[in-house]
Amino acid sequence: SLTSPILAIETTCDETACAILSPEGAILAETVHTQSGHAALGGVVPEIAARAHLALLPDIVAETLEKSGLALAEIGAFAACTGPGLIGGLIVGSNYAKGLAVALDRPFLAVNHIEAHALTARLPGLFAHDIKFPYLLLLVSGGHCQCIAVKGIGNYEKLGGTIDDAAGEAFDKVAKMLGLGWPGGPALEKLAREGRSDAVALPRPLMGREGCDFSFSGLKTAVARQIAPYGMEALPRPVAADIAASFQRCVCDVMADRARHALALLPEAQSLVVAGGVAANGAIRTALEALAGEAGIPFVAPPLRFCTDNAVMVGWAALETIRACQGAGQALEDGIPTAP
Ligand code: KG4
Ligand code: ZN
């Protein structure tokens, strides 16, 4: 069993992160570095991100060890995401962690990035009570948009997902059309406060339809059509604000509708949990909170720094897996079933 701290690495997108957790899940140290340079290019460039992870990791790991006051030799296990994510970053992060594990003769745990997001809400000390299984996870980030039934450790069912863009991607693309830069979600939310959410008629893709899939491409096209008569440069600010507010309203309505359908597929859900950068959006939080209230279950939104990519969630998912394996009578030394 694991009696020493675990060191975890996260490199799936543009965050280079490291965390050290006690075997019980207490956070001993963490570092999250969001790579600069992608904003100027209008999005994350995978090859640049991978090379940056490689350049940054030694310092990020050293910095995290220093914060924890631990020596590398005191680490009992290493974990990193092996998917899904940008392949270059995955290769860099997982091989870095594996290299350390081999050098120190410690176990290496491969963690599924979605599973890490899914289990974050169960981090000790985050909420007064344990988040019980099963629960519905709405993962809404720049790369993901899924409804997941979290039934237990290693027991997940994808109830629905996007058939085109992720929610954050839609925010970013609409923000770009409005001339707001990248990443556009926060800027769009801010602009939306100046506008009227019923000013512009926009479609609500898949709303009311069976299941809980998402689609955003039609909505994006509809926004582009609203902007076209002006041209981005000449778009008056009040019009841009109305478009932003109306777009955000659409996303809120669609998300609440999709989550409602997902809850119908998981009637025994104990709570509604959100994760991913889009969970920062106040209007979306309000809509989902109302839905959870309707369903009579708690709405659980972990602090934003745990909703977005970080290494704490990777370490925690590894610890949960270790504990589940032990519960099943499987020794850590026998190897951990690795996530796909
Ligand atoms: O989880 P995250 O930090 O990174 C990954 O995609 O893995 O999510 C980033 C996404 C971006 O698309 C960003 O525009 C969006 O989350 N986002 C928001 C807000 N803050 C971040 N979208 C809407 N409203 C926000 N306040
Ligand atoms: Zn993520």
Image: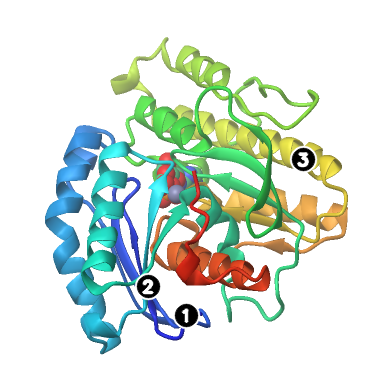
- Residue drawn at the location 70% of the way across and 36% of the way down: 253
Residue 190 in view, yes or no: no
User: Which label sits on residue 90?
Assistant: none
Q: Nearer the viewer, residue 131 or 316?
A: 316
Dot 1: what SS?
loop
* Alpha carbon distance from label 2 to label 3: 36 Å
Inter-mark Cα distance, 2 to 1: 8 Å
Q: Report the residue that reaches farthest toward the front.
A: 334
Q: Are marks 2 and 1 in contact (CB under 8 Å)?
A: yes
- Residue marked by disc 3: 262
Relative side of 287 to 70, left or right: right
Residue 77 image label: 2
Query: Within 10 angstroms of label 3, few (less than 14), some, or many (20 or more) residues?
Result: many
Q: Residue 189 location, x and y as percent? A: 48, 45
Nearest to N terminus: mark 2 or mark 1? 1
Give coordinates of residue 17: x percent, y percent.
30, 62
Asked if residue 314 lies left or right of residue 38, the reply is right
- Identify the residue at image location x=26%, y=33%: 42
Tell me which numbered mark, 2 or 3, is placed earlier along the sequence: 2
Circle nearer the N terminus (3, 1) = 1
Residue under label 1, please give it: 2
Determine the residue positioned at 21% across, 69% down.
Answer: 103
Residue at mark 3 to residue at mark 1: CA–CA distance: 36 Å
Q: Amino acid at mark 3?
A: Ala
Circle 3: element type = helix
Task: Say which residue appears at 44% left-offset and 83% top-offset.
Answer: 22
128 over 141 or under it: above or below: below
Residue, far bottom:
69
Q: Position of residue 322 (x, y in %)?
A: 54, 69
In which quadrant of the rendered view does residue 175 lie? top left
Q: Amino acid at mark 2?
A: Ala
The local crowd at label 2, few if under 14, some if 14 to 19, many if 20 or more residues have their Cα within 10 Å, is many
